[in-house]
Image: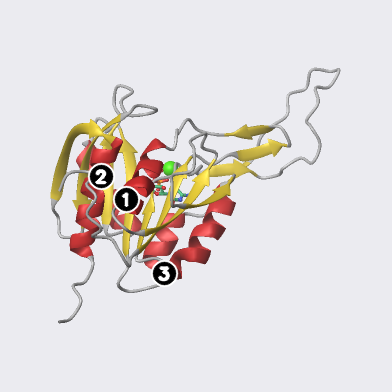
Amino acid sequence: RAAGQSVADLTGKHVLISAGGTREHLDPVRYLGNSSSGKQGYALARIAAARGAKVTLVAANSELPDPAGVQVVPVVSAQELYDEITGRAADADAIVMAAAVADFRPADVVEHKIKKTADGAVPAVNLVQNPDILHTISHDRARPDQIIVGFAAETGDADHTVLDLGRAKLERKGCDLLVVNDVSGGKVFGSDLNEAVILDRAGTALPVPSGSKDALSGVIWNLVATHWPTPRP
Ligand code: CTP
Ligand code: CA
């Protein structure tokens, strides 16, 4: 099925999507962040709504306009995203973690703006690890019939291909589907195009050729729909 085609095949389903990139504040005006645009998560929300789903989009720091007919829940940090996703998981038939979640946050958030000192001393930033949202919702399922989708951007290295890393990540996270992007050479980030391989737990690797983020979204929802248990006649 072509992306965005107005077939209401997701009617009656509630999908929960995260998008954007989290910010981890150091003080009221400074943060550690990442350059995720939110485009892929917003595309997933728009396409799911067009296909009849009830859609909740937990959006971290995206500049994009709210998609029509979608409930948008704004968050800033990984901890806020964790709270919103875990708190809403029991209502969702599918959860897609498209957000770029900061792995670490500053151990202390300073209440007032950090100032330079006369002696030129440089402050140290101590980091602590954020909770792993995808791992938590996958290993501690709120519902047995729920399909959980993760994303992974990988470059591969001397010992591992992008697909090897994707397979290992799918296993570790415990999700049902993992959308793997090859980002070697600066591909994907902020782009309107996406190319991916979608892995499932049965060992299938579905290559999705370079296309729009809407088109990739359409393929993801098609796959999610095939993984939902078929209702008894
Ligand atoms: N993710 C998450 N919570 C985190 C980190 C990541 O839910 N604290 C989700 C992302 O939204 C994405 C998937 O996990 O769907 C994979 O993210 P990635 O950063 O590739 O995974 P990590 O386990 O953090 O591995 P790495 O060390 O490669 O960054
Ligand atoms: Ca990470």
Q: Is mark 3 within 8 Å of ligand 1?
A: no
Considering the numbered disc 3 on the image, is that residue within a helix, a strand or a loop? Answer: loop
Question: How far apart, in angstroms, are the residues tagged by discs 3 and 2?
Answer: 32 Å
Looking at the image, can residue 167 be seen? no
Q: Is residue 140 above or below residue 127?
A: below
Considering the numbered disc 1 on the image, is that residue within a helix, a strand or a loop? Answer: helix
Name the mark nearer the viewer: 3 or 2: 2
Depth check: give the residue in front, 206 or 9: 9
Report x, y in % for residue 12: 32, 67
Who comes first in sequence, dot 2 or dot 1? Answer: 2
Q: Hey, what amino acid is under mark 2?
A: Gly
Report x, y in % for residue 39: 40, 36
Question: How far apart, in angstroms, are the residues tagged by discs 1 and 3?
Answer: 30 Å
Q: Quadrant of ligand 2?
A: top left
Considering the numbered disc 2 on the image, is that residue within a helix, a strand or a loop? Answer: loop
* Residue at image location 63% in from the left, 34% down from the top: 31
**Crowding near the residue tagged with mark 3, few <14, some 14–19, many ≥20 C-alpha atoms within 10 Å:** few
Report x, y in % for residue 205: 15, 48
Name the residue carrying label 3.
140
**Which numbered disc covers residue 4?**
2
